[in-house]
Image: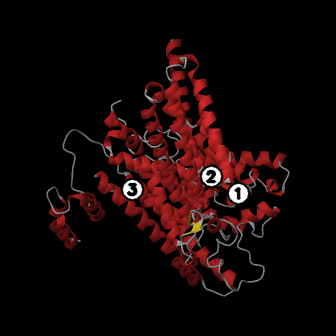
Amino acid sequence: MAQNNNLELITKPLNLNNPVTAQILGICSALAVTVQLEPAIVMAISVTVVTALSNFVISLLRNTIPSRIRIIVQLMIVSLMVILVDQVLKAYMYQLDKQLSVYVGLIITNCIVMGRLEAFALGNKPLPALLDGIGNGAGYGVILVIVAFIRELFGSGKLFGCQVIPDCFYNLGYENCGFMLNPPMALILIGMIIWIQRSKYKELQEK
Amino acid sequence: MKAIRKFLDKIKPNFQEGGKFPKLKSTFGAFESFFFVPNHVTTKGAHIRDCMDMKRNMTAVIIALLPALLFGMWNVGNFHYQMTGEEAGFWCQFFYGLGQVFPIIVVSYVSGLFLEFLFAQVRKEEVNEGFLVTGLLIPMIVPVDCPLWMVAIATMFAVLIGKEVFGGTGMNIVNPALLARAFLFFAYPSKMSGDKVWVAGLGDAEKVVDGFSGATPLAQLAEKGQTQYSLSDAFFGFIPGAIGETSTLCILIGAVILIWTGVASWKIMISGVAGLLLTGLLINACGSDVYTQVPYWHHLIFGGFAFGIVFMATDPVTAAQTETGKWIYGFLIGIMVLLVRVINPAFPEGVMLAILFGNICAPLIDHFVVQANIKRRKKRALAK
């Protein structure tokens, strides 16, 4: 991988090679943690950190890992990173950590992390691997933030827990859309993002 | 009519290729064929055309819906004046109901047709009549007190996610009208269930006649096992409920029209009723709480089963396509209606969820029917 492509490693997963909308990975946690904006952002940062660091470490070890046991080695390193992130969250953001509950632990099984390790870190040098991890984590985060923004705004009328929709709207008969708080709506929203993206970039459309 | 023709001919060049608004071609075409029979003819070969095209099919359903709709309008007024305790004549009640229901119909058509026209322009297709029935079904299955903006959002959601995503009329997996209702049900449960929403104006009424309850008979049955409404009330439709669903008699008239014109499948209706009755018998025999002891055939006339099985389950797009499949599909819906109604404590009514479930299973049912047929014929061919 040439030097001038390093920037592309970060920008491409944001749009054309987005892990959620183009590779359809990591959907499950995207449905679960996007009811509010704050946990979604924390989740996005956690996944970015885990992906970047484990990509980096695996890339350093790539020549010493026997290929027959590489999955178990990858799992070990990913679990290590996830536990680190979990401990940091527990220490500094205890309430949020409770809100995210199992989903921080479940980053271990997030398909994006393993996917990047298998597809990129095992065959590339540490620096590109690190950038690739950051890019993919950010690409995942962008979708999470968009979905969480829409869901929190229309589902509970708030952003970051503060009421945004003024009271006079409610007096006029406006009501929060309870369906926005249900996971199916998150799936529909992600579907619509994919729809918009593919009608804009024709090369993403499957034949 | 001549003036309209002249006007259309005058503005037609604007919408052709190279005109001012070529993008609006299909909008123009829709209005032209609304007023006049289109003049394009097939040029090659022999064609047999049935007069039952989409427009005729849709019109037949609309006609079949009219008795239930008109009765529903009157019933809205009837219950409103029962609640306030005022004396009102027949026409007074009817016009009050008309005033409540008509805005819902207008909002449903305007918001749905807006999206239909938009997608027809973008995809450069003709605007078709696919929304005609959906637009009337949606007002008939919502409570009369449902706010208009909710109807608009639900209609747009249903047209967008239920239909246009899959490629437009005839490609949808679930019934768009039911999808609109399901959206409302899960998005705004306080406006779609309970005992305040079924009577116009009950939610913010200042003075209500003593002892008046706006709860639907099914909600009462689910709670206490009995209802103040008699069976004949329920059959003729003098019960609170969604606008079009109350009168079993008017729905039966609609069913006769649908079967007579051949638009809807009688097999689905018959097997749906059979499924409901058999499940009801079973639940009567081994149920323990009060709702399970409601006589099995009462479920036919209380609630939305009649409306659902006649007008919703028989939607030719989302129902099973094979003839054997239709029997299974209807039967499945009948069973599910009672399971959701009686066994599930969360919902007193289950027709909507049962039919959506049936819609989703329909392709699977068809697949197995077709496979079984292939297997049977292969066996026969090999035996010779």
Secondary structure of residue under mark 2: helix
Pair 3/1: label in front: 1
Asked if both marks, 2 and 1, belong to the same chain, the answer given is: yes
Q: Residue drawn at (33%, 31%), measured in percent from left and top?
A: A2
What quarter of the picture does the N terminus of chain B occupy?
A: bottom left
| Amino acid residing under circle 2 | Leu
B69 relative to B332 in the view: left or right: left
Which circle marks residue B15 in the picture? none
Q: Earlier in the sequence, mark 3 or mark 1?
A: 3
Measure the alpha-carbon separation of dots 3 and 1: 37 Å
* Residue B146 visible in the shown view: yes
Instruction: Indicate the position of residue B286 as horizontal and vertical percent values.
Output: 84, 46
Q: Answer yes or no: do the residues labelled 2 and 1 have beta carbons within 8 Å?
A: yes
Number of marks drawn: 3
Q: Residue drawn at (77%, 47%), measured in percent from left and top?
A: B281
Would you place residue B96 above or below residue B330 in this image? below
Which circle marks residue B56 in the picture? 3
| Amino acid residing under circle 3 | Arg
| Amino acid residing under circle 1 | Phe
Would you place residue A44 above or below residue B184 in this image? above
* Residue B337 visible in the shown view: no
Residue that mark 1 sits on: B347
Which circle marks residue B353 in the picture? 2
Farthest residue, direction right: B288
B184 relative to B22 in the view: left or right: right
Pair 3/2: label in front: 2
